[in-house]
Every structure is written in structure tokens, then in C-alpha cells.
Amino acid sequence: MEALAANITSTCPLAFAGATGAVFAQAIAAVVAAHCAIVDDTAWPRDAADDVLKNAEATYDMIIVGGGTAGSLLAMRLSEEFPDWSLLLIEAGGDPGPDSEVPAFLFLSQNTEMDWNYKTQASDKHCKGFHNNQCTWSKGKALGGSSSINAMLYIRGHPKDFNLWEEQGNYNWGHKDVLPYFKRIEKDLNLMDVHTHDDNNPWYKILAQAWGEMGYSEILNSNEALLGSKITKLLVSNGTRLNTGRVYLKKASGNLHIMKNTIVKRLIIDKETKSVEGVEIKHKNGSVMQIRASREVILSAGSIATPQILMLSGIGPKDHLNAIGIEHVIELPVGKNLQDHAMLALFLTIDKEHSISVTAELMTLSLIQYALTKTGPFTNIGITDFMTFTNVKNQSDYPDIQYHYTMFPSNDQFMLVPYMQGVGYKYNIIEAVKKLNKDNSLLGIYPTLIHPISRGEVLLANNDAFSRPIVKANYFNDPNDMTTMVNGVRQVEKLLQTPTFKKFGIKLHKMTLEFCNEHEYDSDSYWQCYVEHMATTVYHPVGTAKMGLIEDETSVVNPDLQVHGVKNLRVVDASIMPTITGANTMATTLMIAEKASDIITKHYKVKDEL
């Protein structure tokens, strides 16, 4: 740090002359050093890629593909349970950048090297307000996977979500069965007493009070997605993101080898026995090799990459694979059953009297505070950890809409435009929102469809492992989904009539946009048009390797997560969900990995005892 201070002094000799100048130089140097040390390199496990590449004959007991939310937890658990095994974890990305560790930067990690940056197939039915009519599906490409770039929100879902899985034949996956795994995660991550929101922010109370006037009470001391409003737990500790790759992999035993910056091209399969023997990989340095597994391979690559690897290996729909020149091995509905939470952006203005503003000076001071002390506004995510669950049909206590929130100060120069650009909105939409924001703070309310009926699919563009797959979101293909989303808008309009919202002059305006002008404003047809243009993802794709009994022709893996008809192959990630849970999916993905570790441990301990 002395050298840094000296460099500052020599660069600005007049401003930093004398004893007082030296003090200022040391202070600035301390800030720079603190920023650089947000997370040092030792926080991440060593990259064993060079060792693996030099040992072409090596065989591992087990290979786990994907060091993301599920894969990192699973690898750690198996390394603990089987200390005599050799385990290899293969990750397509590297270590996340230090900026990803700052909670308040959650909207700024999109379109970086940590992001797969998938695009949905262009459609004239949805994502019409986005570049090329394509929504951007950000997915983490780094250790920790999407836990490196997501909003860090931890919520289990509704108990009924898991009972529905069990009713579909997935034995031991009901709520009573998965609850102990959620509790284990919460204990390990110390979520019981975690406190991450900004108590000085009055908007938590304002939102809770308004929804209370609508009949929705606050949910206290529960991590489940029940009807009502709640402040959600965050995977944040000591002001820093709890990246699952860092949290779990640092606990792993020495028998776990981690190979970073490596793409799995395909599985090595014995066509006669239908047994998986290993994987073929390509490292970022261009090296290609085959790596063998004596026991099994586990795919934890996520709901897009897992079906991609399966299909590249010949496991999937025969007609599709034959059409692109891939030798077919076994017929399974890989890539089907794709589900996602579609989210609609509604930007509400707040009366000028109650609007807030943030100056460049305040932002700078807050960042310095964070760099030096890991305290202040950069340790949280504003009001995005507040959410409300409702049933817009008023037919049951099982929610069908979840509301997310953001807050942008008037004439926001820092977050609004980068957020909208990262999401992928067209220029004219961004300009229209900026116009609303010029003189008023904006309250973003996002009705989110949490139990979609529509189903999409993932397909291969060709037989090249480095080509982006085709993602057909198929949002609102079922008209009931559109009806539910429009009902969510209507519920926000009722919220505007509450005494609390009226007190703050909160209003929903028609934005100055040319689309939907042929529809009468506030008609159902107008809002349907608005949804087609403005709705996008909450980055929760699931279901593309569906769990179910072998008799279920729509399923890919059994309740023990083994791929039907294939030996020595499992899937452990969000792609196995039969139906999407009614909340942010990270907690459920972690639960799947925890439960999978128990399933695998019991399988091999019983097998080895025989």
C-alpha cells in the first residue's frame, strides 16, 4: 500500500504535499486496497485443470459436471461422505469477479463473462419489447453458477409445490420429505438469524401497510411462500454475497479436484450396455480429452446446459437428434417440460413530495463505506427482498402471483438504465421509462406468474457443443396464463386505491410508446398487448429433465435422479423439477442437491456392503 500511496503523491504533487497530503494519500490508498480485496484469490479453490490435462489415463470414481448452485453443494457433500473416492468437478467458467460479491450490484452482472447470456427464440407472442423479440436468460457461468449473479433471495416455495411432486409418483419428494433438507441448508448458511435488509428504508412498512389494507397480512418467521407479504432471507453474510461455490467448496475434502474453464462436449456412452463411462471435455486452452468415471457421472449443469449435454450425447428425442446428425442412443423427452416464471414490469411514479434522490457524492461515499467496512446501502438490495404472494382468483390459499419490487430515485443516473439494458429492453422503452423517472421516483412492481400452464422446450441448434441451444420459452401459449397475469395488473390497480398508496401519490401511467396504441388504454386487450411486449424472465428455468416414474412418458429421471434406461448417469439440478415451485428457485435447487447427496450416499453404502 505504501507504493500505491507514493504513486498517488507523485501523480498529484501539489495536492498531496506535506504531512497532511501524506495522510490523504494513505486514506485513498486504503480505499483502493479495500476495493481490490473484496474477495481475494484464496477465497476460491485451486484450479486442478493442468493436473487433469497432464494425466490422460486418470479415472475418477465420480465426475460432476457443473460447479453451480447444486453442483458445488453436491460435490462438497460427496467428498465428505466418501473420503477415499477421487471426485472431479468440471466447471465451464472460472472464479467470479469481485464485483459480483457486492449485493447492491445484483443488476450489473448480466452480459459479463460470468453470464451464459442465453436468448429465447424470437416470437411474435412474447418478448416483443426486447431486442430482436428475444428475452435474455442470464445464467451464471462461474463457480457458484447463478448464485454468482442472482438476487440472493432464499425462499422455499409453498408446501403444496412438493406434495404435487409426490402426487405425480415421485416418492419421498413430498413436503414432509424435503423439509429436513431445507432446514439443513438454513442451518449451514446461518439463515435463522440473518439480518440483511435496510431498517431505515420506510418502503418496507409502506408496502406492507398497503397490502394489509388489501387483506394480505405480513408473514413472519417463515421461509415459505405463503399468502401475504414478507421480507425474504438473503444469501448475504458480513455484507458479502454468499456464493455457493465459495461457501461449500471451501469445506470439501482434498479428494475433490476442480477443473475450471472447461466445457463438457458430450458423455462417453457404451452403446451396447447403455452405460456412461465418462465425459469428453475441451479446456479453454484448446485441449480436448476424454475423462473416465468408474462409478457414475452426474449432470448439474442447469436447466439449459444439462439437456444440451444429454442431447449432444444421443439421449433425447430421436427425430430431433437424427435431423442434426447426432447418433441416437435412447429416446427420452429431454428438453421438454420447460417452465419459467414470467415477470411483468410496471413502473409507478411517486408524488414529488415523497420522491427520493441520490447524488453522485452520496453514491461515492456509500461505496467507500462498503469498501472499508462492508456496511451501508451496498450490503443490501433495496426493497427487492420484499415480496407479496397473492391468489388473484381469490379461490384458495395457494398463491398464483408473486410480486417483486424495485425502487429508483428520481432522475436515477446509476441503476435504472444499466438494469433495463441488461434485461434487454429496446431503446424506445428505456427512453419512455427515463421520461417517467426524470422528475419522480419510480416504484417498480412486478407481477410474476408462479405456476404457469404453458410449457416450452430446449432444442439443439446443431451438433456443435459450443453453439447456443434454441430456447423456446412459449410464454402465455396457454391463454389462462395471460388471464392470470392481467388479473395481477388489476390487483395492482386496486393497490393504488388503498389509503397508503394514495397518501404517497403513487400512480400508474400509460407510457409514451407506440405499441398497443390501437387498444383502448386500461382495457384487457391493452394489458394483454403490454404483457406481450414487457414481460420477461425472472431467470428461473426448470423442468427440462423432468423427474418421474418410468411409466411417465414425459419424464427423464426417476425419483433417485437416475436417467431412465441409462446406467451410471444422474441429473442433480433444477432441470429435474416436475413442476416449478411457486417462488424464487435457488432454495429448491439447493434442496435437490442436499437430498441427492443422501440418495447417492445410501445407494453406494448399501451397494458396498453387499
Image (spheres, grey):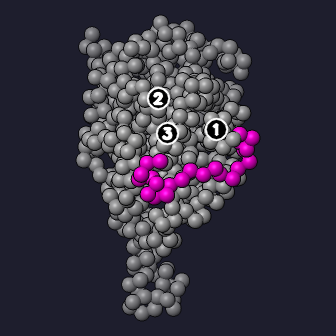
Name the amino acid, label 3.
Answer: Gln
Q: Is residue 10 left or right of residue 476?
A: left
Circle 2 is placed at which residue position?
393
Circle 3 is placed at which residue position?
491
Circle 1 is placed at which residue position?
523
Judge whether 201 appears above or below 60 on screen: below
Span of residues in magenta: 497-519
Q: Nearer the viewer, residue 485 or 106?
A: 485
Would you say the magenta stretch is mainly helix, strand or loop?
loop
Q: Are marks 2 and 3 in contact (CB under 8 Å)?
A: no
Give residue 536's mark: none
Q: Give the CA separation, mark 3 to mark 1.
A: 14 Å
Residue ID at (52%, 27%): 452
Picture coordinates of residue 142 (x, y %)? 49, 44
Circle nearer the viewer, 1 or 2 = 1
Mark 1 Cα shell of 10 Å, populated few (<14), some (14-19), many (≥20): few
Q: Give the CA separation, mark 1 to mark 2.
A: 19 Å
Name the amino acid, label 2.
Answer: Lys
Kindly state the secondary structure of the residue where label 2 is placed.
loop
Kindly state the secondary structure of the residue where label 3 is placed.
helix
